[in-house]
Amino acid sequence: MFLNRRAFLAQSAAGLIEGQRSRLIIDTHLEVWTFDPKFPFHHPERPDLLRVPMEAPIENQVQQMKDFGLRYTVLVNPRFYGWDNSYIDHALHRYPNLFVAHGLLNPEDPKIVDNLRYWIAQRGFQGMRFSPIYHPKSTWLNSKQHYPLWREAEKLGAVFNYYILPHQMPMLEDMAERFPGVKIVIDHLGKPDLHLADPWPEFRKMFRLKRFPQVWVSASEPYELSLGKDFPYPDTIPFFKATYEEFGGKQIIWGTGYPRPRWELPMDKELEFVDKILAFYSDSDRKLILGENALRIWKFPGQAK
């Protein structure tokens, strides 16, 4: 008996999802937010921003994880809440078996070390995200004033992820050299600027960090890098390939960015991008990138400490 088209598609989709469940998939960068007034927006660069077009609450990601067989997710506080990590804290403790969390800290707060200690030691976060991309002329990233922060991060086992511009990579390289006990994730492929006539000289500054075993690059958000903005984002593929050739499979991780509703890239396309568009990944390295590397960075629920 022949299957009708609808039954065939349903069966194919079921087979695809079952295949995803058979491997370890960890989303290492997921931002969530709610319109619940208990968690008001306080965007540090956009104080006028009180609402965005759509809500992306934690419950959406819980469903996405069920639908696509994701084992864990690393939650990252979006910029909307400023330095208030309350919603990520709420999500982490509501679903403690699914998530680990990164918050935000004001890099110029004189109490930054105390704040780090609070969120890591008392609230159970595992890291913090810093965004020097919003401060392109600032040097706080590797200032001596931040040495105590990094020393405390080493003591606490905290992970730092950086949303950073290519020209800022030497500052991050400096801190990676000084504080080898801090695990570092470079967000979104190091943000190569495809608007430049030749983005490669600046982009290659990131490659110097491959010598540090405590550094990983997040191969994520091609839609934010691409000038064309259409899947499969062919103008970004040379940068993904070069990063893979330089860092190798052991120093690359996978993340998405936003939960359902995914107005940039739905989850099935996120996985297709890794599985098919970035066809140069070896099968063994794809396993590392999609999940196994993350186990070396974070302590996930139920994993051996």
Image (spheres, rainbow, N blue to C red):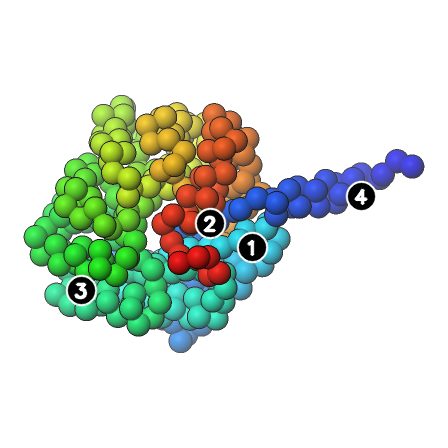
Instruction: Locate residue 174 relative to residue 96 in the image: left or right.
Output: left
Q: Nearer the viewer, residue 99 or 187?
A: 99
Asked if marks 1 and 2 touch (Cβ < 8 Å), the reply is: yes
Residue 272, given in percent of the width and then of the height, sits at 55, 36
Mark 4 or mark 2: whose residue is earlier in sequence = 4
Secondary structure at numbered mark 1: helix
Mark carried by residue 65: 1
Q: Residue at x 41, y 33 (%)?
A: 249
Residue at the farthest right position: 1
Mark carried by residue 7: 4
Instruction: Locate residue 11 relative to residue 286 in the image: left or right.
Output: right
Residue 5, given in percent of the width and then of the height, sits at 80, 38
**Distance of mark 3 from mark 1, alpha carbons?**
34 Å
Q: Is residue 101 above or below residue 254?
A: below
Mark 4 or mark 3: whose residue is earlier in sequence = 4
**Distance of mark 1 from mark 2, alpha carbons?**
9 Å
Mark 3 or mark 2: whose residue is earlier in sequence = 2
Instruction: Locate residue 83 relative to residue 136 in the image: left or right.
Output: right
Asked if marks 4 and 3 touch (Cβ < 8 Å), the reply is: no
**Distance of mark 3 from mark 2, alpha carbons?**
28 Å
| Amino acid found under the numbered disc labelled 1 | Met
